[in-house]
Image (tube, grey):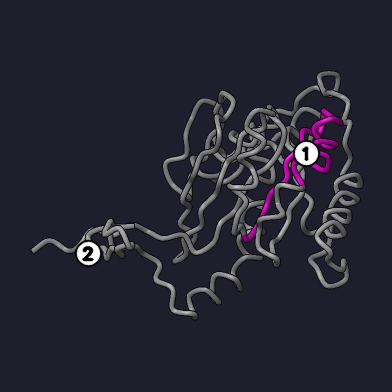
Amino acid sequence: MPEPQKMKKPDVKVVILGDMNVGKTSLLHRYTERKFKDTISTVGGAFFLKQWGPYNISIWDTAGREQFHGLGSMYCRGAAAVILIYDVTNWQSYVELENRFLSLTDTANDDCIFAIVGNKADLTDLQAHITDTEPGQEAESEADAAPVNLPPCPSSHLLHKQVNRQDAMALYGRVLHYKGLEEKACLPAEKMCFETSAKTGFNVDVLFETVFDMLLPSILKKRSDGESSTVDLEAPRTHKKNKAGCCS
């Protein structure tokens, strides 16, 4: 007889928040698929399941458009980590994180980890011109995904950087204050603030791997509590009957 079909069950949940056009979806594609994609705006939210070693991590990519704002708190429910993303060339996208998106994290776990990320660093910083693969090629394996240096972009083509890393670190402190957390008892801002480029791959792996490392204690705790890492799709379901005799 064939073995019962099973689906991987996420150990923890990570949610990505930020205004539209900051590159949330492109950043996630760069990490999960090892390539850059021009994407259209996310509608509602999208779910990815990442296998990280023996662990399963769900990553939720959320819409930045105003009309989908109300869905954000639903996606954040039970999140173990939230990644707040802004565009380094757009000051308003940074402001929106605090004004519009931070309150959505009220439904996240009390011990939720926060990372502040400035994307599109390749537009302002020559150092960010690193890619995971040669232009026009896709990595066929982990070994093929080693970063390679590209010819630097002429400095005359760089855009003005509107949000500096110091601004991100200041926001991180305000996030902790909003959540009622003591900075001394939390991860330092220097470790949880990043500048990335979805286009070149700069710091993308560093971002996600750092967040996942920070989540490891939560993952191990859940597994030690006896929660299974898979869901049996063929297991019989039990239905409770209400007073009218209907299944609920």
Residue 123 among magenta residues: no
Q: Which residue is mark 1?
A: 100
- For the N terminus, the image quarter is bottom left
Res 149 quadrant in image: top right
Closest to the observer, 15 or 149: 15
- Toward the top, the furthest residue is 156
Residue 191 lies left or right of residue 200; in this view the side is right
Q: Residue at point 84% right, 23% down?
A: 159
Badge 2: how crowded within 10 Å, few (<14), some, or many (20+)?
A: few
Badge 1: how crowded within 10 Å, few (<14), some, or many (20+)?
A: some
The CA distance from mark 1 to mark 2 is 43 Å
Closest to the observer, 70 or 136: 70
Residue 97 among magenta residues: yes
Q: Return the x and y of residue 239 as percentages of the image width and height.
A: 28, 63
Q: Which residue is mark 2?
A: 236
- Residue range corresponding to the magenta coloring: 80-102
Closest to the observer, 163 or 135: 163
Closest to the observer, 81 or 98: 98
Q: Return the x and y of residue 174 as percentages of the image width and height.
A: 88, 53
Q: Return the x and y of residue 42 as percentages of the image width and height.
A: 57, 30
Q: Return the x and y of residue 38 as percentages of the image width and height.
A: 57, 24
Disc 2 marks which amino acid?
Pro
Q: Is residue 70 above or below residue 208?
A: above
Q: Which mark is residue 125?
A: none
SS for callout 2:
loop
- Toward the front, the furthest residue is 244
Q: Residue at point 56% right, 39% down?
A: 30
- For the C terminus, the image quarter is bottom left
- Toward the left, the furthest residue is 1
Disc 1 marks which amino acid?
Arg
